[in-house]
Amino acid sequence: MDNLFTKIFRKKNINHKHPAHLKKCLSALDLTLLGIGCIIGTGIFVLTGIAAANQAGPAVILSFIVSGFACAFAALAYAELSSSIGGCGSAYGYSYVAFGEFFAWIIGWILLMEYGMSIAAVANGWSGYFNNALTAMGLGLPEVLSKAPSLGGIVNLPAMVIILIIMSLLIIGAKQSAKFNAVMVFIKLLTITLFISVAIFNVNPANWHPFMPYGWFSTLPDGKTVGVLAGASLVFFAYVGFDAVSTAAEEAINPQRDLPKGIIGSLAFCTVIYIIVSLLLTGVVPYQELNVPSPVAYALQKIGFQWASAVVATGVIAGLTTVMLVLYYALTRIIFAMSRDGLLPHTLCEVNKNTNTPVKVIVFCGLIISLIAGFIPLGTLAEIVNIGTLAAFVIVSLGVIFIRKLHKNNKATFKNKWHPLIPLLGIFSCGALMFFLPVETWIRFLTWVLIGVVFYFTYSIKHSHLNKKPA
């Protein structure tokens, strides 16, 4: 029993080196654009309207601010750990150093669920917008090729194809993927600028009254939770992405300097954009009308700007493409790190000599996720993504406290100005948002964790490289 206990809680040294490495090629600007590319997508183009219509009203702006603060504390924790520990495993790698192998495996398993389901869900959304664009040109796909079997179709072909295209792009190399991401980010920022430029001259202040129709938090007779805090738990999905920057630590040219800039810079920029867009969106159209698939495009249609609405639809396609690209990138790097430690099959961490990318894991993920996106509708799983992300944020914030105690003299570490309070605030704020999620989400989440525990004791603990070494 003592030997098993030692294996489970054994930690990696903070300076532990691996034989397989990725090429350093990403600058601070690349990392910041990587974060913006992942954050600005479904949240700003879809969730702003849904959260306003169903949960918070015009006060959705406060929901974004609450979620933004929770993410800020987590972002500062990520920045500190990424600059001191590094590696491409994100919260998985930090947990390995802070808490030991078993907890690292659990958080890594949660991240696989979070990123994998996110990619498939966004691919479904991308498919809908893409098919709408084709329909507008008279080239729309039949339902049998654009919907999952449970929705009356045979396969969601566009969702499968876009994942395979992104798979090919990631195989080529991280720098090439970053360049493509930069172009897509530029397109969707132009789209957002267009919306702001048009909407700012068409605001009706009467649409902001009542500003908080559901208060801070309340429960309706049907059991539905509403209010600013309930809205914050939903729009939190809009911020998922800045943590993906930390998975690029091993490919950052100067990770101790550039990772904190990329993480904090992308989050700060996107928070400001969310606040502006949500304020204008509820000012242009009454919040009750915003429960539509594309509220930003809908708002422009309502005020008579059809051409602007079409441009926004194009920006949505570009935006969702970059979200999938960065999430896919992050997923492959986490699996790469877990495989390199022996917790997943070793073949998944082999780096191709020509492209300097883990081709096998990229192809493995692409094939599985494309099948999921093509045959399974994933609408309700967005909440599972939220709870997985929040759990990761809590663990990272807790990890900061442990790492500070273990490595008090690490002068190279990025430290927050108010560093004693930041991780505690991160734990409290992200834990509180988890509390507002539905019971069904908790059940699905705990079921996934249980499956991970079984896999660890049947495979991972026996193949772990760290456990094979003498104590």
Image: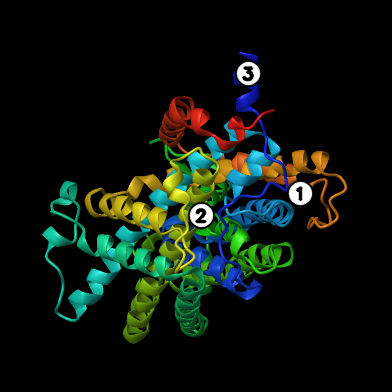
Taking 19 as reference, is 463 left or right?
Answer: left
User: Which sits earlier in the primary sequence, circle 1 or circle 3?
Assistant: 3
Quadrant position of residue 358: bottom left
Q: Position of residue 370 (x, y in %)?
A: 29, 55
Precedes in sequence: disc 2 or disc 3: 3
Distance CA(mark 1)–CA(mark 2): 27 Å
Q: Residue at x 53, y 73 (%)?
A: 205
Instruction: Look at the numbered disc 2 and give the secondary structure of its residue.
Output: helix
Query: Percent x, y for residue 115?
Result: 45, 51
Residue picked out by circle 1: 422
Kindly indicate the quadrant of the structure image that contains residue 395: top right
Give amino acid for label 2: Arg
What's the amino acid at mark 3?
A: Asn
Numbered circle sitting on residue 333: 2
In the rendering, which numbered label is found on residue 372?
A: none
> Considering depth in this image, is 87 or 158 the residue closer to the camera?
87
